[in-house]
Image (cartoon, grey):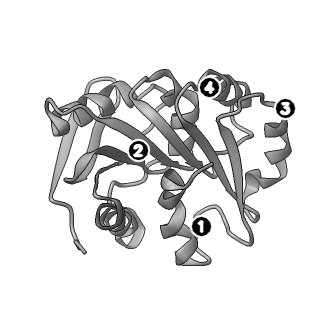
């Protein structure tokens, strides 16, 4: 199993500032990991490097991780441009995995992109612009959209709001006794990407 990225990129975008990426090369399924607000592409204790390596080792996917200097603008046009550059002319599809604010970006913006076939949003705050999150979920026409919440996360109490959203592609997964960072049991954190590869 790899202990570091195959390579890293730093891109300066005039509307977002600088976004950093880590890449592990694999097949034509891209798992794209978006960190939480102001999070790095490496993650605390290298958690995104480890997760990327595990995904690549288990499923053979190309994995691209991204920092998140989110300022309210949609960063995904820029991110998809980077993914295109990494994949070059290969036909590919994207599985988007976002944590916290990265989850919000996936739900509010990612549902607009045809190449994004699956989304996992982890502990995306439901108390911030919920109407935009709901609109994004309703728009999603990909294969699967999974919302993961720890039962100790601040948004857990708002999860019943999701019951009123009519999209058969959506499912909700609750991780018992987990906090916002899914830090109580590392197995819970590192098994989240497996949800991409399980039947609904």
Label 3 residue SS: helix
Distance from the alpha carbon under mark 1 to that under mark 3: 26 Å
First reached walking from the N terminus: tag 1 or tag 2: 2
Q: Which residue is mark 3?
A: 164
162 and 157: which one is in front?
162
Distance from the alpha carbon under mark 4 to that under mark 2: 19 Å
For image coordinates 66% across by 30% down, the residue present is 133
Task: Work out whether 165 lies above or below 48.
Answer: above
For image coordinates 44% across by 23% down, the residue present is 113
Distance from the alpha carbon under mark 1 to that under mark 2: 18 Å
Label 1 residue SS: loop
- Give the quadrant of the N terminus: bottom left
Q: Position of residue 102 (x, y in %)?
A: 50, 44
Which mark is in front, 2 or 3?
3
Distance from the alpha carbon under mark 4 to that under mark 1: 24 Å
Q: Which residue is mark 2?
A: 68
Task: Judge from the rendering whether residue 121 lies leftward or rightward of residue 66; answer left or right.
Answer: right
Label 4 residue SS: helix
First reached walking from the N terminus: tag 2 or tag 3: 2
Q: Position of residue 45 (x, y in %)?
A: 38, 73
Q: Which residue is mark 1?
A: 182
Q: Which residue is mark 4?
A: 136
Badge 4 local density, few (<14 within 10 Å), some, or many (20+)? some
Q: Position of residue 173 (x, y in %)?
A: 69, 55
Q: Quadrant of residue 4?
A: bottom left
Label 2 residue SS: loop
119 and 109: which one is in front?
119
Distance from the alpha carbon under mark 2 to that under mark 3: 30 Å
């Amino acid at each position: 199993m790899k202990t570091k990225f195959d390579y890293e990129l730093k891109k300066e975008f005039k509307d977002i500032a600088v976004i950093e990426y880590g890449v592990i090369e694999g097949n034509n399924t891209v798992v794209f990991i978006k960190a939480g607000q102001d999070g790095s592409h490496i993650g605390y204790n290298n958690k995104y490097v480890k997760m990327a390596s595990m995904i690549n080792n288990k499923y053979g996917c190309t994995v691209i991780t991204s920092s998140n200097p989110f300022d309210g603008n949609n960063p995904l046009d820029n991110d998809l441009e980077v993914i295109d550059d990494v994949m070059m002319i290969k036909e590919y599809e994207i599985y988007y995995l976002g944590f916290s604010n990265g989850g919000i970006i996936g739900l509010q913006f990612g549902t607009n992109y045809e190449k994004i076939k699956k989304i996992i949003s982890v502990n995306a705050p439901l108390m911030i612009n919920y109407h935009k999150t709901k609109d994004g979920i309703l728009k999603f026409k990909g294969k699967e959209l999974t919302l993961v919440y720890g039962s100790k996360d601040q948004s857990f109490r708002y999860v019943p709001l999701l019951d009123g959203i009519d999209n058969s592609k959506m499912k909700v997964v609750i991780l018992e006794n987990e906090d916002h960072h899914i830090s109580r049991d590392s197995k819970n954190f590192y098994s989240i990407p497996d949800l991409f590869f399980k039947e609904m």
